[in-house]
Image (cartoon, helix red, strand yellow):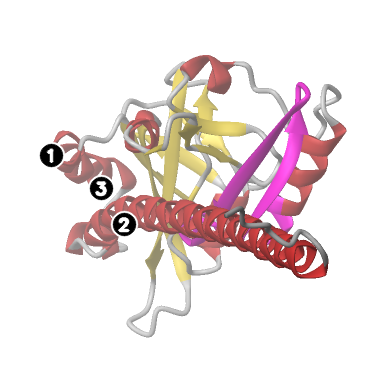
Amino acid sequence: MKFKFNTGISGKLMSLVIGVVALSCVSLTLISYQLIKRNLIRNSLDLMHTITEQTASLINSEIQKSFTMGETLAQMPVILDDNVDIQKKLAALEKEKNHFGCLSIGIGDPEGKVIFLEGETADVPDEDFYKRALSGEDSVSSPRHSGILNEDVITYAIPVFADAEQKTVESVIVFNMPDDEISNLLKNVKFLNTGSAYMVNEEGIITANSDESMINSKVNLINDTNSKSFANFEKQMSSDDSGIGEYYYNGEKRIESYEKISNTG
């Protein structure tokens, strides 16, 4: 006895149903994959920005240590005493110089003339870090080249107040620290296989990087003619306190997270 299978409407309907189910499964798989992919990207971006925030916080902490050191010097009785001449004040600072690891240290007046321990002088009335100190704020420069020391340094300026209310600045303690104290921190910052950290000043010039050649090049990233996309991103970064953005450089898409270092003004 032979059996016949009906391949009519019901068979076609079954095929259609199976086809729809199969298509639905594929669609759900693709949707799940896209959701997972988006979540992974979002989590990676969140992690990147967290690392950026932590790095900025670490740099701020190092700067704050130097501020505290400078405040200690500025509050020494010999520094506050108007009857003590500047040479004796410098002699008192000499005892602290090596203890704190300063490359050089000096005292500046309200006109911006700084006399250093070694006898050299510098006129810095127009420097932003010095102006902030004269206004009563602890201040630090971006890494900069010192003509006196002939090397790159970070310059700190700490106000010395003439009154207990700390309203009148009579002089400024100025000291230079090695600029690699920040670059060395950045060398340890890595993200996945290709991520690294660097620091730029308000002008768009790299001031700290694990690659010293990038620092020495003094390239202005905001005016970078090789990549308009990168230059525009750097402009955005210089005007914002924090964020994540993307740009193209040498035909390659890059994603970057940034955070302002508050202690640098």
- The residue at which mark 3 appears reads as 89
Mark closer to the chain start, 1 or 2: 2
The quadrant holding residue 191 is top left
Q: Position of residue 223 (x, y in %)?
A: 82, 32
Q: Position of residue 20 (x, y in %)?
A: 72, 64
The magenta span reads: 237-265
- The residue at which mark 1 appears reads as 99
Q: Which mark is residue 61?
A: 2
- Classify mark 2: residues with Cα within 10 Å, few (<14), some (14-19) or many (20+): few
Q: Amino acid at mark 2?
A: Ser
Q: Amino acid at mark 1?
A: His
In the picture provided, is 261 more to the left or to the right than 3?
left
SS under mark 1: helix
In the depicted view, which residue is nearer to us: 90 or 152?
152
Which is closer to the viewer, label 2 or label 3? 2
Q: Amino acid at mark 3?
A: Lys
In the depicted view, which residue is nearer to us: 112 or 157?
157
Which residue appears farthest toward the front when viewing the image? Answer: 1
- Classify mark 1: residues with Cα within 10 Å, few (<14), some (14-19) or many (20+): few
SS under mark 2: helix
- Above or below, 113 against 157 in this view is above
